[in-house]
Amino acid sequence: MTHHAFVYYQNSLDLAVLPDSVRVPGADVEHIICEKLDIGTVRNLIRISHTKPIETSHRDFVIVSRSINREAQNALLKILEEPPPTSRFHLVIPSPSLLLPTVLSRLQEVQVSQVDDQNEVFNEFMKLEMGERLAAIQTKLKEKDIDWSEAILAGARKYAVGTKTGESLKQTLKTTELYFHRNGSSKKMLLENLAIHLP
């Protein structure tokens, strides 16, 4: 079976997780990089995905985004269910929890290694006393340091998988990832709750 749609989990808008052949835009490589993927962008993607390749046998479409609303996902699902035969899609997002199950089922997950800088941010966070953790969260959110927050989530996810953690932490992490990228969510409250459940 030939796969035409791939997903990579990466916590910053970084192309390093992608295969070398699609990291740089070109005649047959299209990049869409945005904070939030909306319906208009997906409709344009659908339109251009039906155009023929110029230099190779197929076209690659790279989508890098921190969040995707439901309307955009439903539109994306249509192109994933019936893709043009000459198109391949690469989706880079922070977490599988951002996707509807129907969209997720159409994507092949590509395993990527954690970024060292993200691990270092999380390791430093874990060394802090609880009061210092809460202060760090408040400071980083005030500075709108999204990469820092994403690094904490990535580190917590890796920690939960790599150690024998309690169900309380796993459930807290699941809830945090589910709501963190939603509009109107209290990122401060979610991160503080996660910090409390980390050892």
Image (cartoon, rainbow, N blue to C red):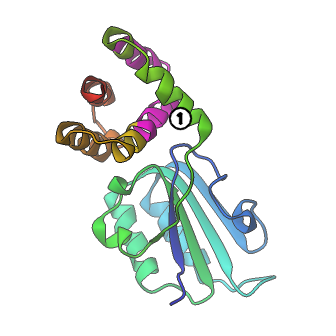
Residue sitting at 50 percent across and 19 percent down? 143
In the image, residue 27 sits, relative to residue 66, either above or below, namely: below
Q: Nearer the viewer, residue 119 or 143?
A: 119
Q: Residue 64: percent from the left, percent from the top? A: 56, 55
For the C terminus, give its image quadrant. Answer: top left
Q: Amino acid at mark 1?
A: Asn
- How many numbered discs, if any? 1
Identity of the residue drawn at 61% across and 69% down: 61
Check residue 16 for magenta coloring. Answer: no
Q: Is residue 129 left or right of residue 170?
A: right
Using the image, determine if residue 72 lies above or below residue 67.
below
Residue 150 in percent (x, y) is at 46, 37
Image location of residue 78, percent across then percent down: 40, 79
The segment highlighted magenta reads: 134-155
Q: Is residue 199 left or right of residue 27?
A: left
For the stretch drawn in magenta, the main secondary structure is helix
Q: Is disc 1 placed on a helix, strand or loop?
A: helix
> Dividing the picture into quarters, in which one does residue 101 lie?
bottom left
Asked if residue 140 is among those painted magenta in the image, a careful observer would answer yes
Q: Residue furthest front?
A: 164
**Residue beneath the point at 70% across and 66% down:** 22
Pointer 1: what residue? 119
The residue carrying pointer 1 sits among few (fewer than 14), some (14 to 19) or many (20 or more) residues within 10 Å by Cα, namely some
